[in-house]
Every structure is written in C-alpha cells, then in structure tokens.
Image (cartoon, rainbow, N blue to C red):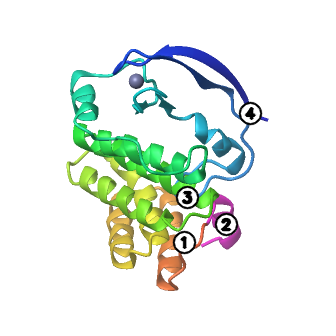
Amino acid sequence: MSTYGTKQVICAVCEAESVQTTIVSASRAGAADLDLRAPRTERDTIHAWLQECPACGFVSADISVASEPEIAAFNAGVGALGDAEPGSGAELMQRFQRRAAIENVLGDLRAAGFRSLNAAWVADDHDLPEAIERRREAADCYSRYLATDPPDEEANHLGVMLIDILRRAEVWDEAEGYCDWLAARDTRPIVQTIVRFQGEAIARRDAAVHTMKDLEAARV
Ligand SMILES: [Zn+2]
C-alpha cells in the first residue's frame, strides 16, 4: 500500500494557498515495462506526481517554486487548463501535458519527454485512445534531446526508453533505426538483449506492452 500525506503550499505564480497531496511511501511490486515505466502498484501514486494550483491552474512537481521564465510562460498561456472533466483520467492526462508544454517552452526537452510519457501512462491506465499520440509527443521530445548530444550514459538510457515508446506508438521505421543506433553504441549484454527482443517485436508489428519479465521469459 502506498501512503500519502498533505502539505500546505503557496503558489509561486499567484500566491494562493492550497493543500497538496504528498507521497510518503510508494509500494513497489512487479516488473517495470521496457520503457522503464514503474509497475502498476508504484504507478498508482501518479496522481500525486504533479501539484496543481486550484486558483490559477499552474502545474509543477512543486508549485511553490518557479523560475521567472516559467512564470512568464505560464502567464502567456502555456500550460493553461484543459477542458477535461475534473477528477477524470483525461484531466490527469492533461495535467501532465500542460507541464510538458511548459518544459518545452523552457527548452528542457528531456523533462518535456518524460511528462508526455507520464501522460501516456495515465491514458493507458484509463483506457484513453490518446495514449499513442502522447507517446509520439514523448518520442519527438526525446529524439530532439538526443540530437543535442547528451552524455553517453544518459543517451543510452534514453535510447532504451525511446525504442519502446516508438514501438508502442507504432512508429516502426524509427524504432528500428534506434535499435541499430543503440546496438552499435551500448555493448552491455542486457542492452543487447533488450535490443534483440525489441527488434523481433518490431518485425512482427507488436505494439503491446512488454515488461522486463517478458525479456527473461523470451531468453532472446
Ligand atoms: Zn496559483
């Protein structure tokens, strides 16, 4: 069981006070997906990953802190409230999209990619048809970030995630291209195994979810 607490915070944009949910401890059981998505038990805390100011709608991991460019972007309308029903899965998905939009404007492509991916995970868990679109947005951010030539370790880690995101978004050619790219630069056995497993799944046009456990079972 995950446990939660609450915290009184003051919004850095509009100075309104609100009570936000905090995660005290998250339970973890089961295997991560191949895009490194946490198992279901841990992912259940996703509603508390971002705070939202009830007064102005500003969204951030911690709404009590915001940089000047961040406040300017939000005040210019980036990351403004969506049209989803309050409390719905769509609303939670849009919360992550709104944060992704802010990160994009700030030029943090890695963070924008991660928030788009979080939005896809919410869509998965609520059976929303937008999951594929959110994955394509995440893939776009991550590929643009990889083009900026980040350090090898980080690039290889993102490469593993990106292949799975592209496969699940049915962007087959690009997914295949990143398999070749990663296989040539990261020779660790686990990475070579993942790439082979993904290559086979891509070849049979398999866009289903696969976990690290499937990898062991397949012994590719
Ligand atoms: Zn506010």
Q: Which residue is mark 1?
A: 197
Looking at the rendered structure, the secondary structure element under dot 4 is: loop
Image spot of residue 197 (x, y percent): 54, 72
Residue at x 44%, y 57% (from the top left corner): 160
Looking at the rendered structure, the secondary structure element under dot 1 is: helix
Task: Evaluate whether residue 214 shows in this view.
Answer: yes
- For residue 129, above or below residue 8: below
* Three-letter residue code for mark 2: Asp
Measure the C-alpha gap from mark 4 to mark 2: 26 Å
Measure the C-alpha gap from mark 4 to mark 1: 32 Å
Looking at the rendered structure, the secondary structure element under dot 2 is: helix
| Magenta segment boundaries in residue numbering | 210-220
Image spot of residue 149 (x, y percent): 22, 48
Location of the C terminus (image quadrant): bottom right
Residues 181 and 127: in front is 127
Q: Which residue is mark 2?
A: 214
Asked if the residue under mark 2 is in contact with the one under mark 1, i.e. CB atoms within 8 Å, the reply is yes
Measure the C-alpha gap from mark 2 to mark 3: 22 Å
Residue at x 31%, y 40% (from the top left corner): 103
Q: Which residue is mark 4?
A: 2
Measure the C-alpha gap from mark 3 to mark 4: 21 Å
Q: Is mark 2 within 8 Å of ligand 1?
A: no
Q: Residue furthest bottom?
A: 204
Q: Is residue 74 shown in magenta? A: no
Q: Which residue is mark 3?
A: 123
Task: Evaluate whether residue 114 shows in this view.
Answer: no
